[in-house]
Amino acid sequence: MIKVGGIFAAVGIAAMLASLVSPALADPDNNQLIIEGELIVTDVAAPDSSPLDHIYSGWRFRSPETQSLQMDDFENPGFVAVDAAAETWETADGSEGKSCASCHEDVSSLAGLRAELPKWDEATNKPATMENLINRCRTDRMGAEAWGWEQKEMVNMTALISLQSRGMPVNIQTDGPMAEWMEKGKDLYYTRVGQLNMSCSNCHEDNYGNQIRSDHLSQGQINGFPVYRLKWAGLGSIHRRFKGCMENIRATPFKRGSDEFIALEAYVASRGAGLAVETPSVRN
Amino acid sequence: MKKLVVAASAVLMLTVGVALADAVGPNDVAMADAVVAESLTGVAGDPAAGRDIMINRKLGNCLACHVNSEIPEQPFHGEVGPPLDGVADRWTEGELRAILVDVKQAMNPESIMPSFYSLKLGARVAEKFEGKTILGAQQVEDVLAYLMTLKEE
């Protein structure tokens, strides 16, 4: 009896130790993302082309505290950017004296756009991201200067326009002229880079759900971008996140807006087909 | 006294110099049957230094992926790789040295684990790290000396 008690005590201590040193989370949790009374789908069966069975939004891998920030638009720090962009939307800029609203009227007219980007663009004979489309409007229609990829006005505007698609399933073209770009993006996804010699797949396909020190690895889905990252204390683009990952692996990142990152964005978007657009999402 | 310290540090520097000169280069490590039998430097590893390297995020950062209950003071241990508890019971020194040097050659070419003393790196290595191994030869020996203390049996 004493021995049994001893074992129990030992197990208790081991459990305490384990709770100290081992991760608190493992798989994605079962929480539901409800914003303004609307259920946002955060997991679906994976698309046919995916090596995974089931896909999960990164929201499902975050702590309850971080999750809750995204469940209320008044608490979501990404909405500061959305509000700023709503003003820009109405403000004329450039030689033509036009604002976004001059042509597009209410921003809600762009609902659905985020869900299908990047999409094939006949004008440039390559896929266009939202940043590409915004800058074309600015230079060709407004006679205004193009914005930088990570310039505040650009990131804010992509947040405002993407928000119009919140709740809609990601649905990106993968065939036709996009097929070649999907292949290119897939190659990049599985290519080991940097001194640490890792590919996207090593973490986000083979090890999602596992802790990597204090970070809970997600599937690296991009349905919530631009994302408000607590670490950045601000909003950032998809390509900024790619760049950060490559730097962590001690690789020279591709440039934001490069063909490589556009191909990777298209391929990663295709891996998230069916997940709801969540912009502006909140992550750590 | 001052003279003595200077003399002592000169001797120390000389020792380190000799150790470095004698270190086996990353391309010349003799691995056979997933074993690197010989020390990379001929200088015994320092387990305490190895423990620090294991924790240091810019060096080994072993805790990023492995649970190690001998380091309970560090709060976050990863779970990508197997726990290190009792690792010295499961592997010999030569096997562990081979895993540290280049796990892809020693065990599994698909492994996510970085090769800590190899120049077979990924594409587009950042300039700062080009042509460099993640750990130095003596650092590998230090980590190895620490791992050899992790026994449960």
Image: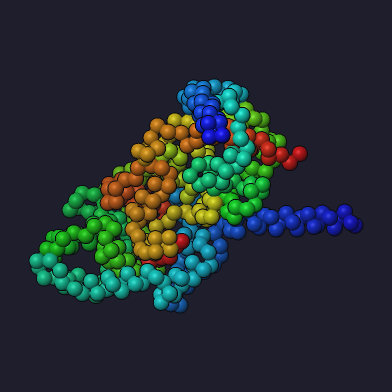
User: Which quadrant holds residue A133?
Assistant: bottom left
Q: Is residue A120 left or right of residue B94?
A: left
Q: Position of residue B145 (x, y in %)?
A: 63, 34
Judged left or right of residue B22, residue A278 is left
Q: Considering depth in this image, is B112 or A170 the residue closer to the camera?
A: B112
Can residue A181 be seen in this snapshot?
no
- Image point (63%, 37%), residue name: B47
Residue lying at the far left in this picture: please name it.
A95
* Residue drawn 53% across the image and 41% down it: B60
Report the number of discs. 0
User: Residue lying farthest right?
Assistant: A1
**Residue B57 appearing in the image:** yes
Q: Which residue is located at x 57 percent, y 43 percent?
A: B52
Which is nearer the eye, B124 or A176?
B124
Residue at x 67% of width, y 43% of height: B85
Q: Position of residue B101 (x, y in %)?
A: 53, 31
**Image color mode:** rainbow
Q: In the rendered image of this protein, does residue A240 appear above or below residue B95?
A: below
The residue closer to the viewer here, B99 or A224, is: B99
Q: Position of residue A43 (x, y in %)?
A: 49, 61
**In the shown orientation, is residue A1 left or right of residue A238?**
right
Name the quadrant of the N terminus of chain A: bottom right
Residue A257: x and y in percent read: 27, 51
Q: Is residue A88 above or below residue A122?
A: below
